[in-house]
Image (cartoon, rainbow, N blue to C red):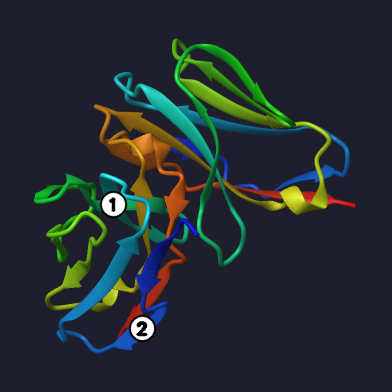
Amino acid sequence: QKEVEQNSGPLSVPEGAIASLNCTYSDRVSQSFFWYRQYSGKSPELIMSIYSNGDKEDGRFTAQLNKASQYVSLLIRDSQPSDSATYLCAASKYGNKLVFGAGTILRVKS
Amino acid sequence: EAQVTQNPRYLITVTGKKLTVTCSQNMNHEYMSWYRQDPGLGLRQIYYSMNVEVTDKGDVPEGYKVSRKEKRNFPLILESPSPNQTSLYFCASSVVPVAGTEAFFGQGTRLTVV
């Protein structure tokens, strides 16, 4: 079992819809969770971080964390074609080690 | 401009020929790390450094070496590259020594070992 698992997709949503990206993690000692966006051929960029249970909102993005279920999600409201990318979920433990999922491909169709 | 710079961007080499991929950041970050990215496997941490002269292994350190003699530089060394080290490599740095706040990634180095 991978430490951080994501559905590889692709997830296709129409423009203006809500895109929902999901991630599960296996190690309960994981403390911090992150979502990165990676455009094809480019480097990852951090878009959201979440450390405690509940929701965290930043513009069109909402990260959700449920430590009891070991589940992290990212909602993208009003999806735009420019949101089409691979979204990487990552978990950090012990403050140093960062473990990434394989990523979910998101396609927003205009 | 704040940035992490990797060189080279593309490299084709032969098995066993030692190579170094350089990484430099201009933000005075303490934390730096190296990742490799392979299809279906995502990003895997190779080595990280909490500060000058402080380095530690990540998930896939075999076949790699690093050094941190200066705060701004964190080179990745492949002493004897093999074809299974063909991959896309990223260097990253962080303003605080917490792995997850890696706000800055380098442009990536695509390495092919034949």
Q: Nearer the viewer, residue B12 or A70?
A: B12
What is the x, y in percent for residue A82? 76, 53
User: Which image quadrant for residue B85?
Assistant: bottom left
**Which chain's residue wears label 2?**
B
Task: Tell me the SS state at disc 2.
Answer: strand
Mark 1 Cα shell of 10 Å, populated few (<14), some (14-19), many (≥20): many
Q: Quadrant of the C terminus of chain B?
A: bottom left
Return the residue at label 1.
Answer: B33
Mark sitting on residue B112: none
Residue that appears at 32% across and 25% down: A27
**Tag on residue B11?**
2
The residue furthest left is: B53
Look at 13% across and 60% down and name the residue there: B67
Q: Give B90 or B87, whichever is nearer the viewer.
A: B90
Q: Residue at x 29, y 20 (%)?
A: A29
Seen in the picture, residue B71 relative to B17 is either above or below; the reply is above
Q: Residues within 10 Å of mark 2 (few under 14, many from 20)?
A: some
